[in-house]
Amino acid sequence: MKPSEIIEKGDTILYSINDLDKRMYKRLVKFLANNTLGGKVNISNEDLAQIEDIIYDEVKSSDYEENISKYLLLLNKLEDAISQQQFEINRIKAQNIKDLWNGDILKTKLRDKIVYDLGVGGIKDYFVKGIAEVIREANYFNLTIDDAIDKLGKVLIDDEYTKRYLNQTSRDTLSQYQGAINDAVRVAYELKDILYIGNTIEATRPVCAHLRDTLKGKITSEQLKQTLSEYCPNGIPSDKRITYTTVNGDEHNAKKGSGMIEGTRFENFGQLRGGYACRHEAIWVRAFKK
């Protein structure tokens, strides 16, 4: 599989976790119904202390852990695919890429963060606590049972709580992991220029449209530095407005740095690229022939 196909598969796995919100909602509605007095929420301190365990039990009983295990296995597949891609494009031996990345401390940092965010640590520290707080507030603010259930439904069902959590923590995990490897290859092998791969779509942000359409996806180091000085000067996405033509031929006006991540610079462009949810690949290559 190509790196882009693995990243797409990762998105599919993450967003196929579709039963958890309903499971938690059903379980917590029952919990609230069993803890009322005079039509209002009334939870004892003893029962309230158990709320996070109740929520976590629902996580463990859902398809969440199984799907996350599948997702984490993609990291190794992605490393293999990137190593093969580097061989095909830059003729660098695949094993050399693997050895380079295995010796890079950034690999450990990124993997630790991914495992924390999606694993037990992040789930208990943020995911579970966020829901538990809704129940606690219903008790503290003396809400009616109907109002408490309505609020719970909005958080879990209407706002798609699990999907929102995954968006905040892991939406760009695999694509940024790929970019971090490519950035490490750039430094180790003194690669000079960049291939910006992927299609432009109607929602493509200005910097990606510039790199793909104006510069045709083949960008020298000098051109990238110049682009970043205009679209994300000193790592700050530009607020200056720009009018550009979308893939459908429509004119669109937006901030130059729209969608870009603060801190995007030449040195980490492979990792951060066009910003949040950007699915373009930035592959460093040897200098283009003049």
Image (cartoon, rainbow, N blue to C red):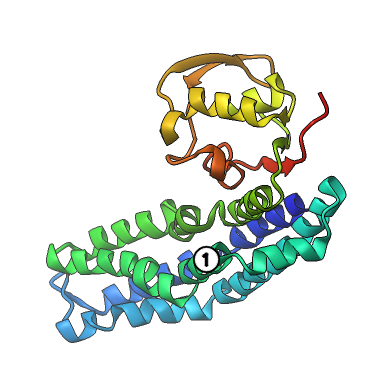
Q: Exactly how many numbered labels are in the figure? A: 1
Q: Residue furthest bottom?
A: 46
Q: Looking at this view, is 142 or 10 the one in front?
A: 10
Residue 165 found in image quarter:
bottom left
Q: Name the quarter where the C terminus is drawn.
A: top right
Horizontal and vertical percent for residue 187? 64, 49
> What residue appears at the point 43 percent right and 58 percent down from the top-left corner?
161
Q: Residues within 10 Å of mark 1 (few under 14, many from 20)?
A: some
| SS at badge 1 | helix
Q: Give the amino acid at mark 1.
A: Ile
Above or below, 231 against 176 in this view is above
Residue 18 shown left or right of residue 120 in the figure: right
Residue 36 shown left or right of residue 184 in the figure: left
> What residue appears at the point 63 percent right and 53 percent down from the top-left corner?
184
Residue 211 found in image quarter:
top right
Residue 129 shows up from this direction? yes
Residue 169 shown left or right of residue 272 in the figure: left
Horizontal and vertical percent for residue 238? 43, 25
Residue 203 shows up from this direction? no
Above or below, 27 against 263 in this view is below
Horizontal and vertical percent for residue 274? 57, 36
> What residue appears at the point 77 percent right and 63 percent down from the top-left corner?
96
- Residue linked to disc 1: 114
Q: Looking at this view, is 80 or 168 the one in front?
A: 80
